[in-house]
Structures are given as C-alpha cells and as structure tokens.
Amino acid sequence: MKRYVYINDEDSSQDLYCGNRISNRKYTVFNFIPKNLWEQFSRFMNQYFLLIACLQLWSLITPVNPASTWGPLIFIFAVSATKEAWDDYNRYLSDKKANEKEVWVVRQSTKKHIEAQDVRVGNLVWLRENDEVPCDLVLIGTSDPQGLCYVETAALDGETDLKTRIIPPACMGIDFELLHKIKGVVECPNPDKDIRRFDANLRLFPPFIDNDVCPLTIKNTLLQSCYLRNTEWVCGVAVYTGNETKLGMSRGIPEPKLTAMDAMIDKLTGAIFVFQIVVVIVLGIAGNVWKDTEARKQWYVQYPEEGPWYELLVIPLRFELLCSIMIPISIKVSLDLVKSLYAKFIDWDCEMIDHETGIPSHATNTAISEDLGQVEYILTDKTGTLTENKMIFKRCCIGGICYGNETGDALKDVELLNAVASCSSDVVRFLTVMAICNTVIPIQSKTGAVLYKAQSQDEDALVHAASQLHMVFVNKNANICEIRFNGSVDHYEVLDTLEFTSDRKRMSVVVKDHQNEKIVLLSKGADEAILPYACAGQQTRTFIEAVEQYAQLGLRTLCLAWRELKEEEYQEWSLMFKEANSTLVDREWRIAEVCQRLEHNLEILGVTAIEDRLQDGVPETIETLRKAGINFWMLTGDKQNTAIQIALSCNFISPEPKGQLLLIDGKTEDEVCRSLERVLLTMRITTSEPKDLAFVVDGWALEIALKHYRKAFTELAILSRTAICCRVTPSQKAQLVELLKLCDYRTLAIGDGGNDVRMIQQADIGVGISGREGLQAARAADYSIGKFRFLKRLILVHGRYSYNRTAFLSQYSFYKSLVICFIQIFFSFISGVSGTSLFNSVSLMAYNVFYTSIPVLVSVLDKDLSERTVMQHPQILFYCQAGRLLNPSTFAGWFGRSLFHAIVVFVISIHAYAYERSEMEEVAIVALSGCIWLQAFVMTLETNSFTILQHLAIWGNLVAFYIINWIFSALPSSGMYTIMFRLCGQPSYWITIFLIVAAGMCPIVAIKYFRYTYTPSKINTLQQAERLGGPILSLGNIESQARLIEKEGSPLSITPKNRNPVFEPLLTDSPNTRRSFGSGTPFDFFQTQSRLSSSSYTRNCKDN
Amino acid sequence: MYVRKLFKFLTFSSFVAYVVDFEFLFFHYVVEIIDRYETVCVPESRRNDTIGYIQSADNKTCFRRLNVTKQMKQPIYVYYQLDNFYQNHRRYVKSRSDQQLEDPNSENDTSDCKPEDVTANGSAIVPCGLIAWSLFNDTYVFSRNSSPLAVNKTDISWKSDREHKFGKDVFPKNFQNGTLKGGAILNASIPLSEQEDLIVWMRTAALPTFRKLYGKIEQDLQPNDVIDVTLENNYNTYSFSGKKKLVLSTTSWLGGKNDFLGIAYLTVGGICFFLALCFTIVYLIKPRQLGDPSYLSWNRNPGGH
C-alpha cells in the first residue's frame, strides 16, 4: 500500500488523510460519564458490588440496610472518576498547546500563518530556526546552499546531538521564490513507526527538472517533534500528519497497568466468588427444603401456603446478600489507600533524593508499587542511565610522554601546558588532529564563544579539550576549517572525509594546510585499527602500554595518527575514492577498501583517553540487584563495543572465565538463524553450570530474529540472564519488553531519553531518570528517580515492603470478612436456614469499615526485616518475585484460619450463651467481640516490627470497639440498647472472650512457633539473626571487604588488555548500509574480554 | 524473643485455664430440677393426635410432682424451656414493631409486622407481629408439701426493656382477635411495660433451644421437699415436635448451670499444656540454634526459573 502525496495540490489530498490534529484524549465531555462508568464496570469487583447494591434495594431479601453498600460504592466511583477526569483534562491542555502552535504554510501560492492542526498532507510547510517540526515532512529546500540542515531528534529517539538532513538531489538548486510554486508527487509507504526508514520516491512536475524519479531516504525527511537547529529556514512537504506521523504511530496508547498482585487478588476474588456461589446454592437448596418440610410445621412463622412464583429464588438471594461480605468492599478502598501511601513513601524517601540536582524521587503511578518487588527483568538504557552521559577528556599520551597521570586530568597537567606554550611540534600536531579530525560543527554565538554541535560525544570531548589547550576550532565554512592556535589563525581545507564505520573502527580526513599547501591525512580510531598501520620505523610499544593503562582505568581510548601525503599520491587516490563513492554495488565495502589504501604508514601521534563516567554506584546497584535474582538486559542505541565495555565496567556481565559473551549477528536470515541456533545450543549446554552467560545482539539481527525466529529468540530470552542489545530502535526496545512480558515475566524498564519512552510505557514498571536528556522519560514513567543507584532502594526496600504489606493486607481483608461470613453461615443452620443475620447492620458495617480496617492499615509501617538486612541479603527478594507471600496456597492458609476462627467463635459463643442467656443481641455482640479480640491477636502475631502507631492502632481499635458499642448501647433506638453494658458486667462474658482467644490463638501460635523454629524460611532465619543482634555474616560483608582492599589501590596483578572501541556510532548510519568484510566473522571479543578484570572498572567508578 | 513470649503465653493460658476450672468446681455450684412434660401432660388416649388435643377446647390442666434432692437457696428461678422453636427465624425475628411497643402514637406503625399487623377490618393490632402473637401461654402453680409456694412474676424482664422499650401508656388492642389464635391473651387494661411475660418473650432467643424466665421462688427449698406443679398445658409445640420443660434452678456468679465453659477450659488448657510439653521435649532432644546464617544458602538456580 502506498500513498501519493501531491505537493501543494489543494484539491486532491485535502480529505484523503487525517488532519494534523493530535489527540491523546481518552474522553470527551459528552462520553465521559458513560465511558468512564463502562471502564470502571469492566472490573469484576465493581460489577459484583453493583449487583449486590442493587439486590439490597429489594427489601424482601435484604438482611441489612442498603446504604451500607451504596455509600462506599458511590464514594469509590466518584474518587476514581475525578482522577480520570483530571488526567484527561491535562492531556487535553497539552494537546491543545501543540495543536494551536502557529506554522507557516503555503496556501494559494502565498505563505500563510496557520495553526498546526490545520496542516494537511501535501502542504508546503516553512520552518525557521528552533522551530518544532509539526508533522512529518520531506525536505524540499533549505537556506543552506548545499542543501543541508540540522535537526535535533531528542524527542524522537532521545539522541541529543544534531543530525544532518539533506534535500533530495532533484530539488537541489531550486530558487527560493520558486519553492512556493513547486509541484510534484511523493510516493511513500503508508504510515509506519520505523523512524529509521523512509523508502519513498519524489517526482517533480515540469517546469522543475524532468520526469526523473528521485529516491528519498530518511535523510531527506524532518520528523514530527524534532527541532530545527543551525539552519535559517527549511521548507518541506507534509507527508504524514496528526496521529499518523512516525512519532504518532510509535506513541502507542499506554494501557493502564495492573500489578501482578492485583491480578492475583482478582483471581482469588474470583475463587471466593465461586465459593460464595456454591455456598449460596447449597444453602438456598437447604433453605427451600427446610422451608417445605419444617417451616410449614412451625405455626408461629405463618408461612403462607402459596408464595409468589419467585419464591424459590428468594432464599438463595438472601444468602447471596448475607454472604456478599465475603468479598470485602473495603479491600478496594484499603488497597487504593495503602498504594498511595507506598507512593508517598517513595516521594518522601530522603535517601532517594539526588543531592546534586536536588530532585527527589517521585512515583507518578501510585498503583503499582508491589510490582517493584516482583521485578524479574530490568531492561535498561545505557547512555544517561548507567553513565552520566558526560564525556570528559582525561588523559593523553603524546609521543611517548603521558600527561595527566598524576593529576588525573591532562588539561591541568603543567607539563602539557608548558609543551603547548612552547609549541612542541608533536603536541601541536596532536592537537590539530583533535581539533579537525571530526565531523563537529562549530557555531559562533553572538558573545563570541564557540559552541560545538557534535554527532558523537567523544568528538565533542576532544574538540573541547583541544580548545582548552588553545587549539580552538573556530569556524567551518564549507570545507574550510578555521583554527586558532596561540593567537594565530590557520586554515585547513577538508578535501575528503573517510567516514567512520563500525568495521573500520577509525575515521580520517584529508586536509590541505593553507599555510604550506601540504596535504595531510589525519586519522583517529581504535588502537587495533590504527596501531598496526604505523609506519615501519615507529615504535608503538609506548602507545600500546598507554592504551592498556588507560583501559584499566576504564577510559575510552583513541589513537591519533598523521601522515603527509604527496600531491600525486593524493590525486591518484582521490580518483579511486570518487569512483568508489559512486559505485552502486557493494559501495561501503569498496570505500573501505579504498580508504585502506590511504590509511597506512601512519605516524602515531598519541593516545587520548576519554571518560564516560558511570554514574555513582552503578556497579554495586547492578550487582546487588543481580544477586536479588533480577535479570538485566541492556538495550541501547549504541554500538556493540561501547555497550559491551560499559556492560563490563558496571558488573553487567562477568569477565571470563566466569562470564561468557555469545554473539548473535548476521545480515541475512540464514546467518542470523545459524548464529541464533549456535548461541541457543551453548546456552542449553551451560544452563547447569554456574556460568554467567550473556548474549549480544544488534538491532539488525534482532529485527530478523524477532520477525522470523521469534520462538527461538523467546527461548533464548528465557535461558539468558543477561543480554545486550545494541543499535536498537525505540520500538524494538518496546518489542523486547513485550516479548518478555509474553513469557510472563515482570519487567522494569529504565531509561532517561525520549527513545526510552515506548519501552517505559510498555513495561510493567517504567522508571525514568530525570537526567540530562530532559524529562521526557521521567514524565512518561511510573517512577522517576534522579540516579540509577536509587533503583536498588526502590526495588529492594520500597518494592519489597510494598509487596509484603499488600500481601498481608489483602489476605487479612479476606480473612476478616470470611470469619464474619462463616459465622453468619453457621448461624443460618441454627436459624432454620432462613437467612437471618446474626449481626445487625450497624455492627456489620462498622466491622468492615472500622473495626478491622483501621488496624490493618498500619501494616503499611510493618517491616519484616530491616532495610540494612535486605540490602545485605538481596536474595531475599526471591520471596516476592516468586510470589511466595500471596498465592493460592498462602491464601488457603488464611482461608483455613478464618474457618477455624469462625468455628471457635461460633461454637464457644452459642454454648457459653445457651439456654436462658441465648438472647440474640447478646450472642451477636459476644461473637462480634470474639472476632475483634481474635483479630487483634492475629494482627499482633503477624506484625513484625512494632512501633507506637501499631500498638495504638491494634489496642486502640479494641478500646474503640468498646467505646463505639457503649455509645450504641446507650441509644434506646438502636438494636443493641444496654447490651454492651450488661455484657461488660458479666464475668461470664470476659471468661468467654478469654476462652475464644485462647482456643483461637493456641494452635496458630503453636504452628507458627514450630515453623519459625524448625522449618524457618530464609526470612525467618534473617529475623532470628536480626533479633540476636550480632553481625550477620553474608556475602555482602565479604565483598565490602574486598572492595576495601581494592580501594586501597593494590596493584592489579593481571594486566587486562582492553581495546577500547573508540567511536560513538554515527547516528545516521543506518543498518542496511553496513556490511562486514569477512563472511560472518566478527571481531572476536571473547578473547578480548577474557583478559579483562571487572575490578578495574569498579575502581574506576570509585575514583570518580 | 517474641516466639519465646508466645511460648510463655501457651503455658500461661493453660495455667489460667486450670485456675478458672478450679473456680468452677468450688464456687460455681448450681442445682437444677428439670421436668419434661409435653408428652406426659397429654392424656394417654389422645397421644396419637396431640395436635388435635392441643387445639381442642378440652381441659389442659396437668399435675406434676418434683422432688428436691439437694438444698436450693433462694432465689430459685423458674424457667420454661422450649426445644426446636425457631425464635431466630427470619420471618419471625423481624415481625415486630419497636416503635409501636414504645410509643402510643405509633400505633399504626405495623409495616414490619405482617402477617399479624392489622385485624380484618384494618385497625392495628397492639402489640403486632408474630412474636407477640405467639406468646407462650402455659401457666404453672406451685405448692410445697401441700402448702402454696409463691412465684414472684415481677422483675423477671430486663429493667431497660420495661423502662425504655415498652411504653407505660401503650395498652394491648385487638390482640388475639383474629380467626387464627396464636398464644397467650393479654389483659387489655395493663400497659405493655407491665406485661413482663411478653417482655421476656419478645427478647428473641438466638438458638432453637432456649429458656425463658417464668418467675422466681423466693424461699429456700430443702432436700426431700416435694413440689407439686399444677400446669395449664396450652402451648402448641406438638405440630413441630418441640419439647417443653419446666426448669427450677439456682444461680451463681456465672449464671445458671452451664458445663460447657468448664469443659472447654479443661480442653483448651489441656491442649496448651500438651503443646508446651511437646515443644519442651523437642527442644531438649533437638535444640536448634536460631538465626544461624549457615541456613542461608542462596543456592537456588540463578535463573530462578
């Protein structure tokens, strides 16, 4: 399917495609109430409560006052509806802002100012510098004579650097005035979400050129939400608008997230519901049978001989209402309440405030804290998430002399500064390469300061460092670079740029020095891509040592080299290069081959070392979380080598022999399939071994794997604890999250940039780092934190406690409802199965809403283990991950307990209050007090850490129970007039209560004691250890000791060799242009990594 | 250690259980005379049609002789005990109007009282409802060793009921006037607050077996005393095969005779003691160090799958 966009043709495409109106709204004013109600009622629990509330309106069957259900129900609905409405209103406001932004569009051959929402497909849109692109455009013209423009795509893919966009060749050279009248057709595919691909054709109509079809790529487009930078104006044709843009398509509607725990609670609720139905049917039948056999004989009941037709239904329905308290309406309210408390705990946590920026952690989504404790997979972005995304030039080695070793910062090294001042030729050449050999664009601001727009952070760091060393790259005018050094201005003409590819691992420029008309080749690249090509006489020994030394420190190294070219040599080569550049088949391979011919006999100038600092505490955090049984996947847009290196330095993967990296690559289906199978085989073999396996896959292979070998890849995903996915697009990130979610894993995605937004929204839990790439991710995320290291606390402390507390709270809620419900059921057997409620409405309502809800709410303060212990033994998280604390079997325990307690309370109260004392209201209150007392003790037993608040809630609640009942007992109109006073004066009442507590608690205490002592869970063991108060011997302690030794700086015994991949990828380097030299023999990084020691990296971050 | 505390709790509760039982044995001494009369009070010739007998207009007077075996200190409570009588039935228990009982102006507030709410001509029944309508109407007259024994029928209901739930100026009206006769007839000139039999009856029982206070004998009974009871066997329990019993009982600080609490305390105390013993033995045989980190083996499959 294709779409044909007629440029500037106002008739044909007006209504064919959707307008440019963006809408993220869920509701309109009119459909809000029905739609919201519909949405709320799609939840099973709400349907159930509504049904019960409706049934209660029928006075024939209701045992209690209908207000006891309607009140809470309406309250709950109003609260959630208000919240929804507020959220939607905010969405509406932000949409409105985007829609009403003004843009220049050509209408009737004149430029007009219209609102962004009125842009139509085919319109010519004009943008000026710093404008946001309102829809997807195909470039037609720019202010730049060469047809270039620069865009910032951060909102789209999270990459902050500038990207170059170029107008299609067919439009080259069209006059500014003529652009208004341009006519033509763009043949482009239907909207999709692939932001790296745009396979279209452009044909301009006469008088512009001829009928030649001009191919378009993504380089000829401007996508919605990008910003135009450093370009005075551009003009483009709208091809996709509104929600059909690449951004709109990839935005996706975030679905409301439901925690695994909610799902489990829903499941248990369903089970209870089924149980309830069974009880109702059984009691209904029993009731009808009793009525027909016995009740007719009980003359004092005066059963009418013939009732209405629905008579058979009446008794079951009565029991339905009587049993409706089995599913506590309070559970939803309590859960919502504690969930928002969990969120507040996160917001209030002083230990999760980023002190550098003062940004506290924030829980945007207040409903999913429990899931944090059940995370199984963490998918993390790299740049900005694990690293600080700040590249800093730290050290260098020029001509065998290392600078910056003492101070840690070459820029402050006096020796280097002296060398620069004395214009030492080696140093000058070194700085020249740093300043020119790149694709950086300098921009002179009005104040005279020079700003650099670099595609790679490394280059940015080098140019900045050079300028600090007085070699300032001032201006780039077409091909002429202007360099200012120590007051003099030099001009270099860039003749050719030998671009970086991931296979060559180096880039070079050929420049002509205008001072002496010499032609020079300047190269920089990874050590293995430069050092072997050193000229015959040069000793590279010192450079190799320097590289190794820097690598040990975790720095990214680059080797700089230089060669003077003879005029003839260059001319000869230049022809070859031009020819290679214009080949259609195997172009990249040909270019690489030609470049190779020039890049040899290099004179090595030196080595630079750049630091991409890991954030504080990243390795420790990852290590702790991995110990907690969480699997890590790194999804990055970066290149393989960079990703692997960062992965190593932050404990993501272990170095050999413990760890092993398996590579999945390939450019074709067959290659990918083969390597996938090979990796899978290795994985299967080694699953039994305690080996740390990780697989590495790049975006291209991933695309194929996900498309054609989904099953195999899924298996791999299940087998592998660690994975590194490089060069992946935002939507691929989201696909990976989805893949893991389909395998029923709980996923957490963490990222900081706009390119992580989809992944964050897709994952069960999205965590955004409010970092340098803006707040986009943080806004889309469920939780935003300031630094990666807070993740540890977020999961281990907040997630775990939330899970534990909700597990207790939800089961306890069911327990207490079941107790009272079972008593009602038992009572029905001694009341002629007629559906009499033993308890009055007031007691029932107060029981659910007050007596039992208040104490359980303070369980949000309960800590089964101290935070310190959890941090020391992160493995304990397993109990949460595996859902050990809330599952059908634990629930069965609570169910059994409620049955047991109901029997105890019922049997004891009806026997202790038999014969002359079997007064209904008294028995009811005795049974109720029995429940309340038992529950106070159950709460006490299940509370692990007491604070004054807990004691207050538990015992205060007991006191409140008596006070409330005394108040009701003082009101003659209430059903329980004087009852409580009478009971409290009877010794037999207190004896009965004591008996109930003793009989109810004795077996439970005994079982708990037995389990605690003889079959303790890991949690119990840690609790015991905590209570003993001694130091808890653990892995954590041993490790911290090990770290201490490291910190003291003992020399590293092993000399790890680390080849630092140099370049950040060229971001526009699209996968389909890459091609490996050999047939599927990638550089072997197994060997490389085998000699790495992770300790050197942890040290690096300590140094920082 | 809080588990130790729980352990102590077990031992402690068993101890308390025995103390309470001790009290039961020595201070909770109750003498009870129970006489079941619903069958014997039907003439033998009518026993195959008890329902017909009870609904007929025949003389229902019946003589029972009770022998006192142990000394009974006053006050001696006279109860009637009904069996298989569902005062807690849903239709029954709600069939009353508390407003009407208390307030003469709410006479027509009979909506809950169906089917005993109004008479055929539409005027309200006071007291309305099934409970009042089915008021127990057997009567007992006692004599000891041939001399009359007074039964005090005042102050047998709850004081709070007399004062606040049954009005002093509410008089029975249209009561038992319908075709369907229930139980007792009330004297229309006595206000409800003084109709103590009704007040007692209106405190519905939670169990199908219950006793209601009939009166108090305010004299001590000596061993070998013979009590003659002249009773009017009016109340129909025959249609649902319910038992009727006359109970004379003394009382203690714990109320009437009730063996349940004693037995229950013995049982629970025994279980607690047994458990405490077991744990002690197990602890002595196989002591277990708590909180030993060597139990912490994190050797689960790293994948956790």
Image (cartoon, coloured by chain):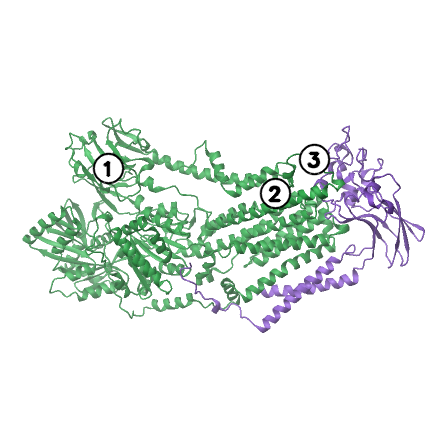
Chain colours: A green, B purple
Q: Secondary structure at mark 3?
A: loop
Q: Residue A776, relative to residue A713: is it above or below?
A: above
For the residue pair A617 and A153, the one nearer the viewer reads as A153
Whether labels 3 and 2 belong to a single chain: the reply is yes
Tag 2 residue: A320
Using the numbered discs, state the Cα–Cα distance from disc 1 to disc 3 in whole angstroms.
82 Å
Residue B15 image position (x, y, % from top left)? 69, 65
Per the rendering, the mark at residue A138 is 1
Whether labels 1 and 2 belong to a single chain: the reply is yes
**Amino acid at circle 1:** Val
Q: Residue B94, relative to residue A1022: is it above or below?
A: above
Tag 3 residue: A306
Chain-order first, disc 1 or disc 3: 1
**Rendered-image quadrant of the N terminus of chain A:** top left
**Amino acid at circle 2:** Glu
* Chain of the residue on which disc 1 is drawn: A
Chain-order first, disc 1 or disc 2: 1
Residue A502 image position (x, y, % from top left)? 22, 54
Residue A546 vs residue A937: left or right?
left
